Image (spheres, grey):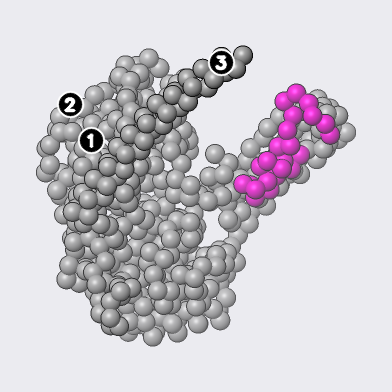
Amino acid sequence: MMAVLPSNSAPLVALAAQGSLRRSHKESHQVIDLVSMFAPVTRWTARVECPDAVPEMTRKAFKTAQSERPGAAFLAVPEDVEAERPADSWAPLQIDAVHADAPSASQIARAAEMLVGARHPVVLAGHGAARAGASQALVRFAERLNIPVVTTFHGKGVFPDDHPNALGAVGFMRHDYSNFGFDAADVLVCVGYELQEFDPARINPDGDKRIVHVHRFPAEVDAHYPVAVGVEGDLSQALDALTAALSEELTYDSGSSPKIRTLLDEDLAYGRANDTFPLVPQRVVADVRAALDRHDIVLADTGAGKMWMSRLYPAYESDTCLVSNGLSTMGFALPGAIAAKLARPDRRVLAVMGDGSFLMNSQELETAVRERVPLVVLVLVDDEYGLITWKMELELGCHSHTRFTNPDLVAYAESFGAHGYRVEAAGQLLPVLRRALEKDAASVIACPVDYSENLRLTDRLGELHGPFLRFRVSRTAAPGELTACHGRPSRADRGLLRQVVSDVTSLVRQCGAFLDRLVRICSTLFAVVWSLGS
């Protein structure tokens, strides 16, 4: 858990008991060097050496964890220090709020000059923009210049998806609709974007796009993220200052933006109209969106469900569609939903989890019931690690060892004291969602899904044509000759690869059986020789 926090830019202060200082220099029962263990994954870690240091160290831990860029802080408290009395009376130290600086006027001028010369700029809004509360400034900036805005999966909602300048989210493992918005872009205005959210090679493969980096801290160095202008400071102030520095007449043609929005809308419309069972993932996304209000919170756990939710679910406010994006941790959504409900008790909270991720942390259902935290867990049941299967099929043309069996999830939920529901037809999901969300209790909904749509999606993305067909120069093509890049083998190639893998597997098994027999023969001969020799 601690390792996830820096990559997700999430603040946390962790306290742990430690063996006494008198035992710290030697091998001892239940004593390890916790400070050294947690140092690589925290912003600050330390051991409390005396009780009088506690107020200062506690304040520093919280200040460090919450300052940009947020992360984890860790304090180890030895048992003998904990038992001591402080020399002076304790009192919490004053909280010193850290405010972002105003952006540099010279950097704003340089960024404005770059935008004046741009033909097709695109804004990429990341998680930093959501943390900074820069939504309204983003809307003002986009509307004033008519610039299309794409968010990362982690930044969903920072720019409302029903805004005419919205192009959805990037983060999918293939060239998705939103990526086409970057293909023709010459300037990228990256607001609160952090590189672990989405590999910049996917939006700037040739490293030739000019980048304006707007954030509270400098950008990470990457060959595909060459920053031409860096604007550091308060994000809202920076966007407003950049808008003011540009001529009133300056505006841009949004190009293919309407087509991209139409493609996303068509996917959702397909889901709403699809009554097949088990449910297609598009139907799940459409029904979740229909069940929740604009300000309600959904957490999409890591797996195939996260891919569908992140790319298709329309979000209208920051922090209303939450994912684990740094290390893509499985099982975070249930404990995360408990935290979200405690932090925002006025909002309904839904965790969307695959059956694999649910079983990794399902014991937290007991916590929700015991602490009377009302929330709903929608478990997408396919008896498989669906995302791993999807990726293996894409890369290898086959998959193995991703299937597993589930308990009776309804009975399992009820054994904790939660409400359990089972979806048995496509038309049942939406009413069951609404019923569970209205209850002042924890609920689990088991919903079978059909992930055969996964490969259909990646096939369809590879077959887009016209202004949405992307090309690359083939390594074997003549200079200037272009070949279509669809990002995955054809069905025929995958079938051939699947047959080759099957034949090799069969051969390995035959060889294994032969070697087994050979070992038995050798063992028998050795025993005979040994007996004769003795």
Q: Position of residue 355 (x, y in %)?
A: 34, 31
Instruction: Identify residue type, mark 2.
Output: Glu
Q: At 21% from the left edge and 27% from the top edge, which residue is drawn?
A: 423
Residue 192 visible within the image: yes
Q: Is residue 270 left or right of residue 195?
A: left
Q: Which residues are magenta?
A: 25-47
**Mark 1 → mark 3, Cα distance in angstroms:** 66 Å
Looking at the rendered structure, the number of numbered marks drawn on it comes to 3
Residue reaching furthest right? 87
Front one among 446 and 55? 446
Q: Position of residue 105 (x, y in %)?
A: 55, 79
The residue depicted at 28 percent of the width and 81 percent of the height is 478
The residue located at (12%, 42%) in the rendering is: 274
Badge 1, how many Cα within 10 Å: few under 14, some, many 20+? many
Q: Residues within 10 Å of mark 2 (few under 14, many from 20)?
A: some
Looking at marks 1 and 3 on the same chain, the residue that comes earlier in the sequence is marked by: 1
**Which image quadrant is residue 368 in?**
top left
Tell me: 396 left or right of 230.
left
Residue to which mark 3 is pinned: 532
Q: Element at badge 2?
A: loop
Q: Residue furthest front?
A: 532
Q: Is residue 443 above or below residue 225?
A: above
Gap between marks 3 and 2 measured at Cα:
70 Å
Q: Is residue 356 visible?
A: no
Q: Which residue is mark 2?
A: 424
Q: Amino acid at mark 1?
A: Val
